[in-house]
Amino acid sequence: MWLTGLKIALLGPENRSMRLPSFTNIRVTLLLMALLCFGFVSLTQLVYTRSWNQTLQVTVFPMNADGHLTTADYINTLSTDTFSTIDSWAAREARRHDVDLQKPFKVTLGEQIWNLPPQWPENANPVSVLFWGLRFRWWAYRNTPDDNGDITRIRMFVLYHSGADDKPLSHSLGMQKGLMGLVNAYAINQQTSQNNVVIAHEMLHTVGAIDKYTEFGTPMYPVGFANPTKYPLFPQRYAEIMAGQVPTDNGSSYMAESLRSVQVNQFTANEINWIE
C-alpha cells in the first residue's frame, strides 16, 4: 500500500490528474446520476399514473398558514370524509368518458404538517422558480418521506388561511414531476366545497392536465368550456375543471361553487389519458 502511495506522490501533476479524478468531475458525475434517477422516476410515475389500471392514492396534508386559532379549529374538524366529494366527482366524470376504472382517485386526510413550505419567490423568473422547485421537493421529502416507496402516491399540501386579513390567496399549483400539489385554501366551512374544486384542479395537474383560463382568469374557448358545442354557447351550465369558472357571457364567468357544477371536457380527458 505504501509503495502505491509513493508512486502517486512521485508522479508529476499532469500524470497525477490522470490517475485521480478531480472533485469537479466527481461532483458533475454525481449530479448527472441524480438527474438520471430523477428522470427515470418521473417517467415511471408518468406511465403508471396515466395507465388508469389502479386507483391513485391521494393524501391531503393540512397546514396552518397564518397561525390563527380559527384556522387551527377548522383543521381539527377535517376528516377523510371532507374530501370524499372529490372521489365521487372523479368517478362520475370517468364514467362519462367510458373509463373502465370505477374509482380513479382515493383521497384521504394525512397528518398535519407544522413546517411551512418555502415561499413562492417574489418577481418570479425561470431561475428563481427552478431553485424554488428544488427547495420545495426537498421540503416535501423531509416532511413526508415515502416510506412505502409508492411511486404513484399523490401528495396535496393544503395551506389553510383564516381570511381575516381580507387578502386574496396566493396562486395554487400542481406538479406532474413528483406528483405534488400546493393549494391555498380558506379555513371557512362555507368555503369547503370550493376548496375541493381547487384541490381537484391541482390534483389533475399531477396527472398531465393543463390550465385552460386566460391571464384574466376567464375560461379559454373552446378548451376551457365544459360544453364548447352548446347552442347557444352562453350561459354554460358547468365549469371545466381546468378553467374552474362557469362562463355566463363573452368574457364573464363565476367561480364554480362545488364539484357538482364541474366537468372534465374532452380536451382535459385526452391530456390525462382518459380518451385518445
Image (spheres, rainbow, N blue to C red):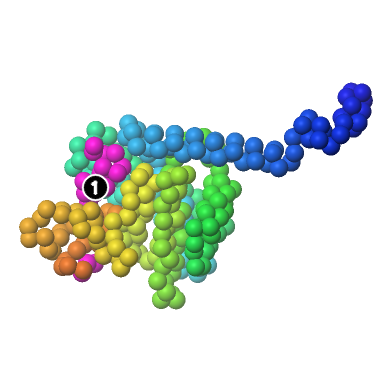
Residue range highlighted in magenta: 252-276
Magenta region includes residue 259: yes
> Please, which residue is most extreme toward the left here?
231
Total marks placed? 1
Residue 195 versus residue 47: which sits nearer the camera? 47
Task: Confirm whether residue 275 shows in the render.
Answer: yes
Q: Is residue 20 magenta?
A: no
Whole-percent x, y for residue 167 in the image: 42, 74
Q: Does residue 83 show up?
A: no
Position of 62 compared to 97: left or right?
right
Q: Is residue 268 above or below residue 103?
A: below
Residue 71 point in image, percent of width and height: 46, 66
Residue 120 in the figure: left or right of residue 81: right
Q: Name the quadrant containing residue 272.
A: top left
Q: Secondary structure at mark 1?
A: helix
Disc 1: which residue: 267
Residue at image position (74%, 35%) is 21
Within 10 angstroms of label 1, few (less than 14), some, or many (20 or more) residues? many
Tell me the residue at 39%/46% (across/down).
Answer: 206
Query: Residue 198: x percent and y percent?
Result: 34, 57
Q: Determine whether 227 is above or below 11 in the image.
A: below
Q: Is residue 94 above or below residue 121?
A: above
Considering the image in quadrants, where does the C terminus appear? top left
Residue type beneath disc 1:
Phe
Residue at 90%, 32% (x, y): give it: 9
Please name the residue shown 78% across and 35% down the image: 17
Query: Quarter holding the N terminus?
Result: top right
- Residue 132 lies, in percent from the top left, at 54, 56
